[in-house]
Amino acid sequence: MSVLAWIVLASFVGGAISVCAAALFGMAVNLQRIPMLISYSVGALLGAALLGVLPQAIEEVGSVELATSLLLAGILGFFLLEKLVLWRHCHEASC
């Protein structure tokens, strides 16, 4: 069997094991904790992606201060956008 076939097979087996483990964990966890766990996982993934891209962004911009200030402005901008969207959110017809 070729190396590519082994890689594809290992990927499928690893993915199947991960899905089964996530399903078993999802059935065992309390339903009230699921939104907290989703928020934690999203934060962890975004944090890992940000830490992976930040050195390249600093190198591309050429200035640490500019890159981090742009990063902070982006985070604050999306935070304010989220707050504005949630502020106008309503489940009633009279809104």
Image (cartoon, rainbow, N blue to C red):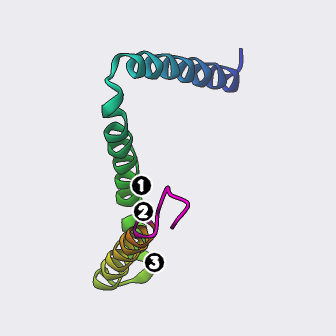
**Local secondary structure at mark 3:** helix
Question: Camera-side residue: 36 or 50?
Answer: 36
Circles 3 and 1: CB atoms closer than 8 Å: no
Residue 7 falls left or right of residue 79: right
- Quadrant of the rendered image containing residue 59: bottom left
> Where in the figure is residue 37, as x and y percent of width and height?
33, 37
Q: Residue at x 41, y 22 (%)?
A: 26
Q: Residue at x 31, y 82 (%)?
A: 69
Asked if residue 20 is positioned above or below residue 66 in the image, the reply reads above
Task: Tell which tag, 2 or 3, sits nearer the viewer.
Answer: 2
Callout 3 amino acid: Glu
Q: Residues within 10 Å of mark 2 (few under 14, many from 20)?
A: few
Task: Tell which tag, 3 or 1, sits nearer the viewer.
Answer: 1
Pointer 3 residue: 60
Mark 3 to mark 1: distance in Å?
17 Å
The magenta stretch is 86-95
Circles 1 and 2: CB atoms closer than 8 Å: yes
Please identify the residue farthest to the left as the structure is shown.
Answer: 65
Q: How many marks?
A: 3
The mark found on residue 37 in the picture is none
Question: Camera-side residue: 80 or 71?
Answer: 80
> Where in the figure is residue 53, as x and y percent of width and height?
42, 62
Pointer 2 residue: 53
Mark 1 to mark 2: distance in Å?
6 Å
Callout 2 amino acid: Val
Pointer 1 residue: 49
Question: Camera-side residue: 64 or 48?
Answer: 48
